[in-house]
């Protein structure tokens, strides 16, 4: 038996270290890497199911092509044929339009290993094309953190164990970040108070010392309410007068924040806001955790900035172990990211790629003319499970002349593609991984040979660019001779080696390494936040009566892991959680089939009554196939900003399905 | 010296993440509906991670017509599945759904507390996997903690078989819910 070091590359807080156990080239077992200081030798349920993720009868084995698109009439083809068909279309479009602007790709976080930027690198090597930018998931919060602190930073999550107060706003680590829970419990053991603020009575809320249910999207209001009461408790000599924007912030709290309005907006009683102010006043250091949930709406940035201000007012932005604002960090940007930033090949007349905000990708691409986009490459994601505005996606698909999907499984998007290329799992490729929550760097070794004919994104980029150059010399300048290990070495610059205290990639073979210096925020760079438009009386018009919340499922990451029988012995079901009142009003019983609908479509689901759900909320955990995202269509305030999608600004109605 | 190895389940710490359940499958390669360990929500406030409790008075042991069950020196209850005739009497007798009938082999299997691991000085896979230390292992012959209790709400009657498990109950929490 041999063992290898792997890293779970899913879009997750954990980025856990894995030890893979291999016998005769087969992955027989996985265990946690005990040298990983965050996950500490443990995995989550999904992680422990990885042998079934790798060896699975649903996994794609060979390149396949279907005709017509969407027919399911798939035929196996050779990699050679697949590359030829793809390359010929790319060259033909280049010939037709005189550039590669008709080529685009939709790639996101299915695998967040650094070598998976090979897709971006490949497109850059073609020269100007149509390029997505932004971040569907956490862009809004990232912008808000940068506005408040001047940079992206998040403290060491292990240090949360030293906090005396932990306030978790709109995050559910018991489901989405299980390894953080031990640090939270360690703090509690030493006397810390754990508070959860969330519209949903989550698994984490169940464990909190104090849970406060809040109306969805009203986090900024609650934090201003807490701040106002906290300010009243502070004697003037304890005011943070030295911080930027203090006077305006103080005046705003004193003159514009009305506690009755705050109570009404948030649904939280005054005595509980008082309780929170008391906790922020008395417990130091306090950790404030801005969860991704609070920023999934059009005021999400305001909420994150308001929490940053509350943390500052309570004296918690200086670097004291356990205090600070937790969101996510940008350690990845310290790396050269040679693949993502691969220089765009020069074009004689076009200076650069057309940029499209990934949060509105399908609709925005469709508006492009001269040339229109005609070729779409999908990798590391299934937009027809996970994105919004499915109508635009479906129309976009119809307008494409060739759609290529790279995936391990037959996703909703793969089903609507012309060609599917089977992707390697992270056990079948080399990679380098750095997370966005903890500060560990780890190497991912190739532990087993590829499953049938699967290939990594990097291998595909190498082989396709080579084929393109054979057919049209000089078409791409991708260095296809470089091996994965060469790209890993290129990421480990002298600066990076210093940051992580390593002399070579080989050091990582002995175990993950923690950053030596953590990027921290400082008071000088901080500025208080006042909302641009403060009008608590304004009511958002709700076209449908229920707000749709669509958080993660415990045993999936978005649409991934849905085919794993250890995790999901039954066929996947879309479950709509509704309040008791909704159930009574609509005459819906537990287990009934229901229709959830709005102007964008209808999704059939199974009803489940949740006694703790706010009355105007319907909660549907994410699924792979019959996905609730069909009902989500939002547009950003400003498409030039890398804001994330306002997933939680979706409204729906519900009814019994006929026959009940 | 006689031992009785048993589980300690801290209901206050368990987050219901199911890592223990799947870690058991990863270790023991049980497929389909054979679940040696299961995580369920047993009450409004608590999850339960439950497997064979390696009882002091195991009913499985008593009812088995083939005498397929044995109890080791350390209290671990084992089944020799090669002796199993598939009668399922143990399945019906166990209050904890521990014996699992495998429809592919027509035989019962169940949690063996990862004794091969324990014999090497390792923890059972489920205990090792628990990131919140909600699931632990101890020798109940010497375990003593006044804060521990013999059962929690929703756990089946312990009087029949005397399961080798101790609990820490859920502590009281403060909660505010919206008044709609």
Image (cartoon, coloured by chain):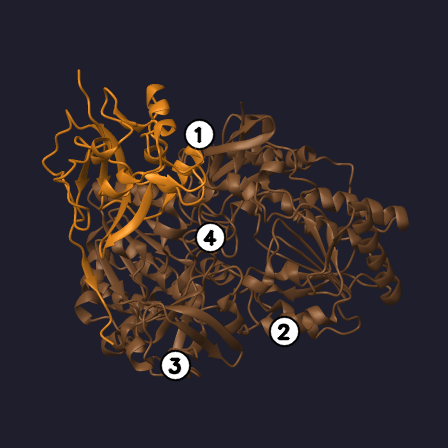
Residue A556 is labelled as 4
Left or right side of A591 for B5: left
Image mark 1: chain: A
Q: Rate crowding at label 2 as few (under 14), some (14 to 19) or many (20 or more) other CA atoms within 10 Å.
A: some
Of the numbered discs 3 and 4, the one sitting upstream in the chain is 3
Q: Is residue A321 visible?
A: no
| In this rendering, the label closer to the viewer, 3 or 1 | 3
State whether discs 2 and 3 lie on one chain. Answer: yes
Residue A91 is labelled as none
Q: Is residue A395 visible?
A: yes
- Secondary structure, mark 2, is helix
| In this rendering, the label closer to the viewer, 1 or 2 | 2
Left or right side of A159 for A29: right
Estimate the x, y position of residue A651 in percent, counting from the top left. Answer: 44, 77
Of the numbered discs 2 and 3, the one sitting upstream in the chain is 2
Q: Which chain is orange?
A: B
Estimate the x, y position of residue A41 in percent, counting from the top left. Answer: 41, 33
Find chain A in the image and tell me its colour: brown
Looking at the image, is A92 positioned above or below residue B137? below
Q: Give the residue pinned by disc 3.
A: A545
User: What's the residue at 80%, 73% (across, down)?
Assistant: A370
- Secondary structure, mark 4, is loop
| In this rendering, the label closer to the viewer, 3 or 4 | 4
Q: Give the residue pinned by disc 2.
A: A392
């Amino acid at each position: 038996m041999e063992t290898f070091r792997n890293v779970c590359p899913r879009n997750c807080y954990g980025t856990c270290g894995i030890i893979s156990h291999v016998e005769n080239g087969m992955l027989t077992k996985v265990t946690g890497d005990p040298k990983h200081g965050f996950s500490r030798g443990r995995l989550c349920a999904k992680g422990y199911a990885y042998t079934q993720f790798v060896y699975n009868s649903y996994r794609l084995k060979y390149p396949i092509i279907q005709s017509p698109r969407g027919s399911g009439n798939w035929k196996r083809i050779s990699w050679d044929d697949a590359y030829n068909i793809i390359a010929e279309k790319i060259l033909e479009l280049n010939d037709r339009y005189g550039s590669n602007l008709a080529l685009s790709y939709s790639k996101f976080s299915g695998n967040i290993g650094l070598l998976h930027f090979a897709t971006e690198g490949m497109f850059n090597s073609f020269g100007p094309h149509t390029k997505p930018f932004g971040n569907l998931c956490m862009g809004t919060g990232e912008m808000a953190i940068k506005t408040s602190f001047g940079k992206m930073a998040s403290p060491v999550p292990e240090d949360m164990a030293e906090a005396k107060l932990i306030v978790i706003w709109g995050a559910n680590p018991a489901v989405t970040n299980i390894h953080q829970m031990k640090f939270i419990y360690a703090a509690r053991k030493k006397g810390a108070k754990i508070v959860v603020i969330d519209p949903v009575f989550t698994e984490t809320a169940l464990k909190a010392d104090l849970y406060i249910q809040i109306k969805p999207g009203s986090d900024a209001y609650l934090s201003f309410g807490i701040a106002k009461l906290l300010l009243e408790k502070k004697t003037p000599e304890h005011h943070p007068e030295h911080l930027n924007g203090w006077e305006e912030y103080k005046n705003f709290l004193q003159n514009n924040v009305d506690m009755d309005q705050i109570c009404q907006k948030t649904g939280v009683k005054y005595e509980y806001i008082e309780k929170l102010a008391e906790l922020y006043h008395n417990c130091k250091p306090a950790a404030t955790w801005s969860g991704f949930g609070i920023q999934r709406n059009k005021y999400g940035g305001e909420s994150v900035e308001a929490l940053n201000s509350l943390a500052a007012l309570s004296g918690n932005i200086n670097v004291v172990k356990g205090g600070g604002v937790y969101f996510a960090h940008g350690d990845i940007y310290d790396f050269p990211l040679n693949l993502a930033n691969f220089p765009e090949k020069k074009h004689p007349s076009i200076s650069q790629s057309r940029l499209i905000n990934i949060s509105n990708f399908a609709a925005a691409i469709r508006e492009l003319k001269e040339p229109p986009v005609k070729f779409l490459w999908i990798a590391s994601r299934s937009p027809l499970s996970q994105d919004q505005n499915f109508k635009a996606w479906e129309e976009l698909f119809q307008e494409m002349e060739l759609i290529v999907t790279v995936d391990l499984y037959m996703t909703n998007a793969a089903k609507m593609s012309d060609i599917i290329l089977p992707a390697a799992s992270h056990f079948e490729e080399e990679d380098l991984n750095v997370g966005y929550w903890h500060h560990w760097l780890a190497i991912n070794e190739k532990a087993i040979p590829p499953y049938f004919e699967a290939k990594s994104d990097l291998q595909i980029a190498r082989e396709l660019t080579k084929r393109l150059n054979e057919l049209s010399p000089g078409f791409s300048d991708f260095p296809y001779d470089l091996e994965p290990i060469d790209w890993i070495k290129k990421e480990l610059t002298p600066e990076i080696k210093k940051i992580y205290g390593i002399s070579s990639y080989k050091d990582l073979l002995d175990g993950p390494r923690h950053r030596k210096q953590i990027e921290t925020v400082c008071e000088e760079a901080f500025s208080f936040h006042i909302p641009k438009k403060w009008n608590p009386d304004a009511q958002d018009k709700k076209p449908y009566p229920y707000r749709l919340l669509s958080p993660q499922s415990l045993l999936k990451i978005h649409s991934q892991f849905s085919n794993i029988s250890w995790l999901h012995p039954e066929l996947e079901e879309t479950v709509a959680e509704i309040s008791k009142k909704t159930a009574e009003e609509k005459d819906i019983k537990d287990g009934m089939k229901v229709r959830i609908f709005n102007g964008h479509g209808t999704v059939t689901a199974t009803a489940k009554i949740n006694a703790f759900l706010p009355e105007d909320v319907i909660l549907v955990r994410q699924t792979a196939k019959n996905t609730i995202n069909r009902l989500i269509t939002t547009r950003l305030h400003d498409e030039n900003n890398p804001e994330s999608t306002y997933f939680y600004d979706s409204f729906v109605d519900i009814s019994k399905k006929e026959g009940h | 010296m006689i031992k009785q190895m048993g589980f300690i389940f801290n209901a206050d710490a368990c987050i219901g993440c199911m890592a223990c359940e799947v870690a058991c499958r990863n270790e023991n390669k049980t497929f389909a509906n054979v679940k040696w360990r299961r995580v369920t929500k047993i009450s409004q406030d608590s999850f339960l991670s439950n497997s064979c409790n390696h009882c002091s008075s195991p009913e499985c042991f008593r009812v088995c017509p083939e005498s397929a069950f044995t109890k080791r020196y350390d209290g671990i209850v084992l089944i020799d599945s090669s002796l199993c005739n598939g009668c399922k009497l143990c399945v019906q007798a166990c209050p904890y759904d521990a014996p699992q009938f495998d429809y592919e082999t027509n035989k019962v299997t169940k949690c063996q507390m990862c004794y091969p691991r324990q014999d090497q000085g390792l923890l059972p896979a489920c205990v090792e996997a628990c990131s919140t230390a909600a699931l632990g292992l101890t020798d109940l012959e010497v375990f003593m903690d006044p804060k521990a209790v013999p059962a929690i709400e929703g756990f089946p009657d312990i009087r029949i078989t005397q399961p080798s498990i101790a609990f820490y109950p859920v502590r009281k929490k403060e909660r505010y819910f919206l008044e709609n």
